[in-house]
Structure formats: structure tokens, C-alpha cells
Amino acid sequence: MKRKRQISGSGAEVDSCPRKCNINDKDHISKLPDDVLHTIVSLLSMRDAVHTSVLSRRWKNMYAYMSNLEFDWHDIISTPADSTPGTVCKRKVRCFLARLERFLACHLGTKVVSFKVSCCFGNTYARQINDWISFAIRKGVENLDLAFTCDKPAERIDWRIIDYYHFPTQLLLHGEESKLRHLSLRSCTLQSDFFDRFSTLSTLVLCDVNLAGHVEPHIFSSCSNLECLTLQWCFGLERLCIGDSLRRLKVLVVSLCEGLKGIELSATNLTSFQYKGDDIELSFQRVPNLGELYVMMKDTDVVSTFAQLEKELPHVKSMTVAKSRARWNR
């Protein structure tokens, strides 16, 4: 017997038992073309995309065509990283490596747009990491985002225990052969000899990066397509010169770079410049389009520095000069 309830004041009776789903309802989504299903899967997270493989035979390998690949230590291992930076359980590393490499071996797509990896180990596993990068390059990657530590540099006590991965810049393709447009690196060593491989980049982010070798002030001069450059917690660079060769550069952020003593800017299209760190020499030669300036130094005289910059750069619409006594040295 079905129970019925009456809606107060209406006299109408409503069936309180829900309708049973029609098991013969057609699956219209699965009938979509493969390229449409690939697009749908690419919008999902890696975990959700893999879960679609159990929906039906048609969906079994759809996740293998994803063009945006992201492998995050915390998502795959699902447990917090070791409390001490630079140390990590080998069993967890093996688990992470096995899952990532298993996925790459199953990948069936011809194109990878974005390839992101965040892990808690470095140069000890350089061979495996090099293989990931080679895979991404073969697939024509446009956005490469690699992080090799799970801690925050601002909270790091002993920098010497970090196993900095030596990024193989020589694996990147030259000129028009390269599809790479965005590169973000965290906690690695970067040889300055191969910066000509960055000529196709429009965005470059270096965080906690050791610039090794003979580092010239014009180290980024070959990056002629750069529009946004961010340097944070980098070391090995004594002077930074941004010249006319970076004619497309619009945004420059330099923050907490140890050993940096001076920055010289002559970028005609630069619109925003932010600096945070030790007291250094700032030289603005040709920056006619600079509209936003933010400077925070340790022991600067805020009033005199602001007056000097305001006189030197009268066209800047937004200017901030601040003083910080926070400790940020290694």
C-alpha cells in the first residue's frame, strides 16, 4: 500500500514514494565524439578523471587522453610530507614514482598542454624526473610547472639539507621547435649556460633556484618573448640587468634573492616592478610605461627613497616604498 500525504490547504495528494529510475534510460554522454569526451575529461582533476574509467567500456581509457596533467605529492600519497625538509620516506617516494610512471606509460594522447609535478624529493631521483620532462617535451608541452620541495622557504631552517635537482635545460628544444610558453621551477639548480633555450617563454617563474655557473647580469637577454618574470628566493645572481632585448617584458617581480646587489632596468614596455629584499641599488634608465612600483627594503629611509623615486619617475601612477625589519637571510 502506498502512503499519501496531503498538502495543507490545497487538497492535493502527493505520492511520497520516489519514482524508480528507468534502468533503460540511454547514456547520451557516452555517444558524444571522442574529441568531445577528451575535452570533458581534461576539465576534471587527475583523480576524478581516472575514476571515470569504471563508468563503462567506452570510458575505460578516456582518462589516458588528458592534455592537462598534474601530479601532486599530497594528492597521490594522501599523507603529510615528512616534517623535516629534505628527508622523505623512501616507501612514499617509490609509491609516488610508481603511480606517476604508470600513468605516463598509459597516456595515449598526442598532445600535453600542461604538465605539473609537485614532489618532495630532488636530485637523488634525477633520472626519473628527466624522463618525465622528456615525456612532456615530446608531447609538445606549453606549460611546465615543477616543484621539488613541499616546505615553505620562508620557514626553512637549514638550507644545506635540500637535495636540489639539477634541471636539465639541455633537454629543452631550440627556437620554433619548442612549444614551451610557461615555465615555473621551484627548488632546483639551473645552469646559466643554457638560457637560450628559454627564448620561446612568455612567463618564467624561478623560486628557490640556484643559478649556477658564471651568471652574467644580462642572463635573461635571450628570453626575448618574456612578458612576466618572477625571481623569488633565488641565489647566485649578483646584478640583474633588464635591457632592450626584453622588449615584451611587462611585469618584473624580484623578491628575497640572496646576494643581489643591484638592478638596472631599461625595458620600454615594463608596466609593473616589485622588489623586496636587502637594500640594493636600483637604476631606472628607460621605463616610460612603468605605472606601478613597489619597493620594500630592510633599512631604507622610506621618506628620502620615496622622494628620490618620485623625482626620478614622475610618470609612475602607483608608487609604494616600505621598510621591513624581518629576517629573511639564509
Image (cartoon, rainbow, N blue to C red):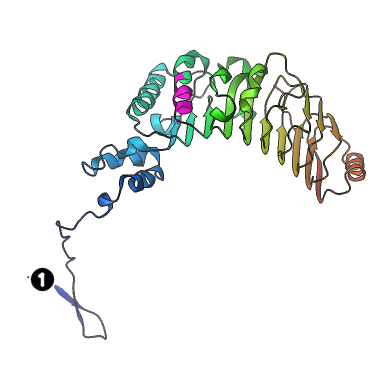
Question: Within the image, what quadrant is residue 17 found in?
Answer: bottom left
Identify which residue, 61 or 92, lies in the foreground.
61
* Left or right, 204 with reference to 145: right
Q: Position of residue 264 (x, y in %)?
A: 82, 31
Look at 15% across and 75% down and name the residue there. Answer: 4
Quadrant location, the C terminus: top right
- Residue 111 percent coordinates (x, y): 43, 35
Q: Which residues are magenta?
A: 131-141
> x, y percentage for residue 281?
85, 29
| Quadrant of the rendered image containing residue 248 | top right
Residue situated in front as seen by the camera: 215 or 280 = 215
Q: Amino acid at mark 1?
A: Lys
Q: Is residue 214 above or below residue 270?
A: above
Counting every numbered tag in the picture gives 1
What secondary structure is the stretch in magenta mostly built from? Answer: helix
Q: Mark 1: which secondary structure?
A: loop
**Compared with residue 128, is residue 177 higher up or lower down, i.e. above or below?**
below
The residue singled out by tag 1 in the image is 2
| Vertical side of 129 occupied by 264: above or below | below
